Image (cartoon, rainbow, N blue to C red):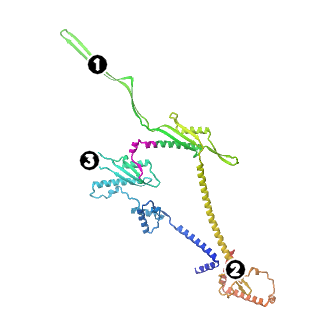
Amino acid sequence: MTQFLDLVGTIFRRYSPAQRAVLATVFVILLSITISLVLWANRPEFVILYSDLDSRNASKIVADLQGGKIRYEIEDGGTTILVPKENASELRLKFIDAGYVGQIISGYDLFDDQKLGMTSFMQQLNMRRALEGELTKTINQFPGVMNSRIHLVIPEGKLFEKGEEGSASIVLSLLPGRFMSKSQVKGIAALVANSVEGLNSDAVVVVDTEGNLLSSGQGEEVVMGASGSQWDLRHNIERKLETKIERLLEGIVGPQNAMVEVSVEMNFEKIERTQELFDPENVVVVSEERHTESSINLDTTNNVNTSNENENVVTNYELNKTVEHFVANTGVVIRQTVAVLINGSYGDSEGADGKVVREYRPRSNQEITQIRALVQSAVGYSVDRGDIVEVQNIQFDKSMIEDDKAYFEAIAGHEMQAGLINKGLIVVGLLVAFFVVRGLLNSVSSEIQLPVLIGGSESVSEQGAFQGQPAAPGLPQGQVGNPLMSPPSAQEPVANYDSDDFMAKLSPEAQAKLKAKDKMTSEVVEYSKENPEDTAKLLRTWMAPMQGSR
């Protein structure tokens, strides 16, 4: 480790102060990025433990998490708590069991621990609580219902007193963004009414947690004459007819090129009539009764006998009678009107300047007639009822749609350009960093020059070359260098001269320098033979800058 630090220090001292600052900055940035990536990769994934908590339960949960040394995060002003994913399921069960979250609803399990000596009042109260709890559990299972509360009013049955009807109130806490339809509200009211003895749906009131009245029973509809149901039936019929016509026209003029409005008049009167018709020409004998009386008078004096006979006939006649009981249907369509507005078509044409222009082309009369006939067939057109079907061709104003389309296209283009610019800046930054580091390495390599052997001594360049390179151990002072290499300018072809003649031609000073050179060379060779490892280290130190400059 010490040798590594010495090597790093040696390399670092070769650079100038400016270069050292740049290298230190790059090193700190790379180290920061590496540490950030490691921390981000090792960061646990947080999931929602509970949301929409009140402050009391949230504080209890946070205290338990702190006591258990479990990491957590708080969002939405303290109403939402997040924990690591691997601990979420266990913590949910733990806090539900502790009673921090939700409400433990008691039902018929109240009677599991009956106590002796309970009064009738306590039994009735527990029975009502059990009913409310069981109904609450059932309603909480409905989709969209987060929680509910039920209050029952059950009258006491008294002897010799006419039974009173009970009532119920239901408070629904719905999930965010959810709502209950009228049929669902009526279903909840019917469920409660049929679960409690002596309770009618009219006496069940349903509200939400914001105080909005969802249902007040059927009594209101009876007072209003069921006008709400009549309006719903009429609206549903109109909407179905509009959907049928729009689906038919989309295949002809294309989507969003037709607008349809249907108005339906309906008869909601309920008529009951009973009629009796008599036919005087058809007489029927219903019954006939005859009474005959006979009498004989005897006159012995005159010897005369007289007899009388009397007949009484009673005949009852009945006329032919027809009894009719007529009940008229309610909710009958008595008249309907349909208004259809269709857009024309668009085509490309060549303008005055030779450019292609998109122009509007209205529908022909034949197309209008065909569309009107199709619409009449679709809605069940009847002349006797006075139905009206009107089809008009008018150009739609789609300027706002085109402006919105251009706006969103411009936003998409800006986002794409911003993404490209960001990526380009990242690439440019990487390239600049690469070339800066490469230039620093090249500049350092060019500044380190190899020492050249001149005459009988070594001279190091006055520019500070060979800075920081240690001399090989064992070499004499002032004999640091590379005697095995000579500068390229000194490598010239040498003629074959006789050494003695050559020495004789030299001056005494040159001969002394040459002898000193030979002596130094022999000393270096002897040292290399005696210390091969140190020599190899010295050569590698000299050759490292040359390899980096390549």
Q: CA distance from mark 2 to mark 1?
A: 166 Å
What residue do we see at 26% from left, 15% from top?
Answer: 309
Quadrant position of residue 471: bottom right
The one of 379 and 264 positioned closer to us in this rendering: 264
In the drawing, what numbered circle is on residue 464?
A: none
**Farthest residue toward the left?**
301
* Amino acid under disc 1: Asn
- Magenta stretch encompasses residue 147: no
Residue 276 image point, x, y percent: 38, 29
Q: Amino acid at mark 3?
A: Leu
Residue depth check, mark 2 versus mark 1: number of the one nearer the observer: 2
- Residue 449: numbered disc: 2
- In this figure, which residue is indicated by the disc labeled 3? 159
Q: Relative to residue 86, is residue 342 drawn left or right?
A: right
Whole-number angstrom distance, CA of label 2 to CA of label 3: 122 Å
- Image quadrant in which you'd find residue 8: bottom right
Q: Does 202 appear above or below 17?
A: above
Whichever of callouts 1 and 3 sits on the residue coming sooner in the sequence is 3
The label shown at residue 312 is 1
Mark 1 surroundings: few (<14), some (14-19) or many (≥20) residues within 10 A: few
Quadrant holding the C terminus: bottom right
Instruction: Give coordinates of residue 53: x percent, y percent.
Output: 43, 60
Residue 98 location in percent, x, y? 39, 63
Q: In this view of the protein, which residue sits in the foreground, 83 or 503?
A: 83
Asked if disc 1 and disc 3 are in contact, CB closer than 8 Å, the reply is no
Q: Which residues are magenta?
A: 211-231
Give the spatial CA distance, label 1 vs label 3.
65 Å
- Asked whether 225 falls inside the magenta stretch, the response is yes
- Cβ atoms under marks 2 and 3 closer than 8 Å: no
